[in-house]
Image (spheres, grey):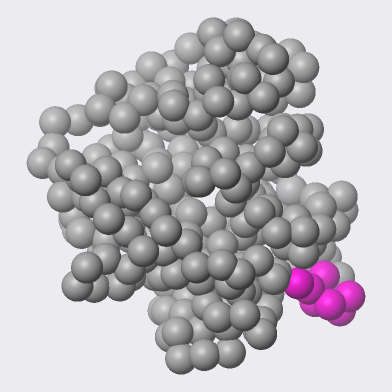
């Protein structure tokens, strides 16, 4: 499997520790652990945090050749956990507001064929990064386009969603984001999944439901998956691990039911450990069949 992602790389800063994160990077980190060949298009600052980022990206086994060196500082998200649920405060402007590829790098990136291209909403809060993504989406050769709707603060708009939906073959949202997105388009919330499939021709819509599990809508069918009973340490990155295992499953030829099962298994494992991309022990490897 050859995967590429576009978007934010940032450091999640807790009260006494910092960890590298950002949804696109987290998804790739898990895909790399699952055996995929991964590349990311992003940006970091010309600072010590940027140097640490590039080293960590290499350690994760992700190709960082398309990470731009920006004049802005490397991204950070100050995180406050309330009942295990994270709240975010981002530095702005920061490097991932300034994602650029020169013509040579863009041509090199677009010369590859990808199993999946992953992109989201948050990194499009700036005109510069959004323009770079639009250039990529207009020409990239990929089997699947995975649009991760990830509402943070007010860093989203109807236009960003519209363009993301138009290209997507898979859309992932949570149950709290659906009514917000539906309102932007004047669509009743209960009809929004149908609208994604009929108006924008999205093949699969994945909705995460927190403790209630998740559901995948595909080809007129619903595939519901319950969450496991685990002791929650923190939920940061849980959705990203879910995305990775779902995409890995499709690439391996599994059907939606099996993909949802594996995605839930990995998400349950992640919430029971510290950090968004914990090491995999033998139990999760066996459960995932890797």
In this picture, is 136 found above or below 143? below
Which residue occupies the foreground of this view, 258 or 211? Answer: 211
In this picture, is 47 found above or below 246? below
Q: Please name the residue shown 81% across and 52% down the image.
A: 134
Q: Please name the residue shown 69% across and 15% down the image.
A: 186
Q: Please name the residue shown 56% across and 62% down the image.
A: 8
Does 78 sit left or right of 146 as displayed?
left
Tell me residue 77's x, y (percent).
Answer: 42, 63
Q: Which residues are magenta?
A: 100-106
Q: Is residue 275 visible?
A: yes
Q: Quadrant of the N terminus?
A: bottom right
Tell me residue 13's x, y (percent).
Answer: 33, 68
The number of discs equals 0
Does 102 lie within the magenta span? yes
Tell me residue 217's x, y (percent).
Answer: 54, 17
Which residue occupies the foreground of this view, 223 or 208? Answer: 208
Does 31 sit left or right of 67 as displayed?
left
Does 288 sit left or right of 140 as displayed?
left
Which residue occupies the foreground of this view, 210 or 111? Answer: 210
Does 173 lie within the magenta span? no
The image quadrant that residue 275 belongs to is bottom left
Tell me residue 182's x, y (percent).
Answer: 62, 20
The image quadrant that residue 193 belongs to is top right
The image quadrant that residue 46 belongs to is bottom right
């Amino acid at each position: 499997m050859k995967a590429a992602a576009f978007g934010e790389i940032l450091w999640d800063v807790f009260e006494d520790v910092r960890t590298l994160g950002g949804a696109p990077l987290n998804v790739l980190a898990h895909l790399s652990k699952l055996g995929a060949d991964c590349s990311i298009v992003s940006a970091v600052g010309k600072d010590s945090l940027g140097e640490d980022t590039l080293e960590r990206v290499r350690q994760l086994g992700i190709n960082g050749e398309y990470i731009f060196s920006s004049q802005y500082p490397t991204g950070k998200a100050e995180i406050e956990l309330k009942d295990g649920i994270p709240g975010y405060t981002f530095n702005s402007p920061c490097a991932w507001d300034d994602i650029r590829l020169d013509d040579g790098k863009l041509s090199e990136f677009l010369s590859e064929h990808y199993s999946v291209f992953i992109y989201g909403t948050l990194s499009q809060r700036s005109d510069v990064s959004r323009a770079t993504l639009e250039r990529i989406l207009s020409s990239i050769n990929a089997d699947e386009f995975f649009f991760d709707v990830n509402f943070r603060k007010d860093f989203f708009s109807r236009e960003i969603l519209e363009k993301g939906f138009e290209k997507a073959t898979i859309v992932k949202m949570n149950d709290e984001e659906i009514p917000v997105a539906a309102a932007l388009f004047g669509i009743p919330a209960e009809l929004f999944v149908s609208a994604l499939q009929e108006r924008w021709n999205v093949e699969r819509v994945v909705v995460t439901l927190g403790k209630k599990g998740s559901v995948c809508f595909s080809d007129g069918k619903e595939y519901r998956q319950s969450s496991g009973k685990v002791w929650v340490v923190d939920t940061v990155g849980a959705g990203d691990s879910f995305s990775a295992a779902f995409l890995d499953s499709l690439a391996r030829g599994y059907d939606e039911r099996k993909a949802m099962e594996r995605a839930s298994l990995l998400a349950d494992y992640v919430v029971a450990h510290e950090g968004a991309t914990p090491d995999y022990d033998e139990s999760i490897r066996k459960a995932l069949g890797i």
